[in-house]
Amino acid sequence: TRTTTRTTRRGVGARGRYPTTRSRATTRTGDDDDDDGGGGGRRARWCVARAVVRENEATSMTTDGDASSSPSPSPSPSSFDWFQAWYPMRPVSFLDAEAPNEMKVLGKKLVAWLDATTNEWRVLEDSCPHRRAPLSLGYVQKDGTLACRYHGWAFEGARGTCTSVPMSVDANAEATACASPRSCAKSYPCRVEDGLLWVWPTSGADAMLKSAGAPCATSLAAGGTLPGEWGMVELPVGYAPALENQFDPSHAEWLHAKYDADGQLSEKGNAGFVPMTKFAVAEGSMNRDGFIVEHGGYNKSNADVIAERVFTAPCSSRSEYVDAKGRKYLSAAILYTPTEPGRTLMYTKFAAHQSGAVQGAGSRKVSPFDRFNALVSAPATSLFDFYIDTFTSDPALVRVGLSHGAPPGSSAYNLGDQDILAMHGVEVEMEQQHKPWKQSYYLPTPADAGVSAFRTWMDKHAGGRVAWAEGVVDDASKVKTEAEQLDRYSRHTKHCIACKTALKELGVLEERCMMASKYLLAAGLFFAVTGAAFDQEAPAVVATCLAGASLVGAETARDMQHEFLSSVPRRGVPKPKLW
């Protein structure tokens, strides 16, 4: 049987262009030849179970993504070059504008700072050419140069030229040292676009010219940039499992679902899954610059939607959902940057165009206890707000940090924890099996077509794995403890200036509350002794109550700090309840 529909789709073109093409998506049963939609005039089709089974039971000698430690092969003209592309490194709002910012891409250690004299961001290799100390330990000087804290050498950011060698015996010796190419630090092209700092991970004059003419992935989106701020985390998993998770939308109906007291899927808390019947690579879209997949819905709330996911290599997945009437339903922009083997930066931005788009697998209802607790804690909440506005170094920045790390904002970590535990399990198992994905995975349903498409692109156009920088060997075990997987500080807090500021201020609040409790307890003891002589017990009682309130405040501040550090509970069994 065959059903055919014609749609207009955009293909991922050479050098990031998006030429409009006519594509035909079909649903077939029969003995069709396997087809990944990779061009050559071959037709894409809606994947069905039999075709996917045949595709993925075939034997392949493909290298497993992120699993090899052999040197990266030189890319052919038809292959994607990992070092000739823009990578997002941080939302600009996350960066410290007054200090060096440490970062990594493809295993390369970099340092970024804001040159206040030009108001431009600069990026150098995080290694001083003098003794190879990290430049990220240094400091930004008033003239906009970055000084190494080891011996004081200073560097300008545009070309990495050394401007100062303090231990030179005289001006001529210093000029000679600064003029030597060996004193230069490697500089990398960077730009700010769509609220992100992007880096081109190749240095030199040719890289400057080539990067200047290359667009960043977000600028290529047909729907334009999305409103709002970017969220960012560094996943403790590799690039391949992270991207696979993105091209596997149906996992949300189980991994992110609500479960009842008996551990079963909640009928009331979830929208209810619907088997996916449509999922395919758009005809002619797969090439070295990426691919496009088209799919239908996967739960009862979005069963009638049609989605298009555009993967722009190596970092961008842009999704556009429309309902049966052609109206916008949901837009999602998700970016990825492989930092080092076993770790990947992920950036997210969503725009829900209809109320049903935010329902997902259900949401937590407000209980009577929640309302009572809010009523009782209202005075303390007001006092905390007053403290933040009056006694912190930067109230606005602290509030941004609290919106990221403290409840209810920290509840978003629960979703990430669920993904990380699953992705980590996949990555470790793939490492231990050391087999090609077509032998390790069994993908019998149309819902699996997105994973197959991404792996096929990796195999055919990207060498089957991430190409790491020279000297970076992917041979370390991917096994991480549960505490490491659930580490919030490494995942987000250390990268975000707002969260680091909020964490610091909460520490100061804890110290002040502890100090206040000590003085108040001492005062309570004094009033208790002296009050007995004058029959005045009230001062002692008040001081003791205030001391107790201060201790509660210190403990609450300690709990809030823990929200920025880990998903592992601070008390009781060190295992979070994720479902």
Image (cartoon, grey):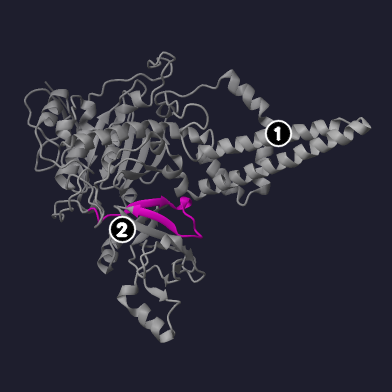
What residue span does the magenta drawing correspond to?
Answer: 82-104
Please state which of the two labelled residues, at mark 2 or mark 1, is closer to the viewer.
1
**Magenta-colored stretch includes residue 78:** no
> Tag on residue 267?
none
Horizontal relation, residue 226 to residue 3: left or right: right
Indicate the position of residue 301 as horizontal and vertical percent values.
Answer: 37, 22
Q: Residue at x 61, y 48 (%)?
A: 395
Horizontal relation, residue 12 to residue 546: left or right: left
Helix, strand or loop under label 2: loop
Quarter holding the C terminus is: top left
Helix, strand or loop under label 1: helix
Residue for badge 2: 200
Residue for badge 1: 549
The front one of 398 and 166 is 166
The amino acid type, in three-letter code, at marker 2 is Trp
What is the residue that sits farthest to the top in this orientation?
Answer: 262
The front one of 220 and 579 is 579
| Residue 379 in the image: above or below residue 88 | above
The amino acid type, in three-letter code, at marker 1 is Ala
Task: Assess disc 2: are there few (<14), some (14-19) or many (≥20) residues with their C-alpha within 10 Å of its C-alpha.
Answer: many
The image shows a total of numbered marks equal to 2
Whole-Å distance between the Cαs marked 2 and 1? 53 Å
Indicate the position of residue 454 as horizontal and vertical percent values.
Answer: 22, 39
Let me know if residue 522 appears in the view. yes
The front one of 166 and 308 is 166
Let me know if residue 227 appears in the view. no
Sequence order check, earlier mark of 2 and 1? 2
**Magenta-colored stretch includes residue 85:** yes
Q: Residue at x 37, y 17 (%)?
A: 265
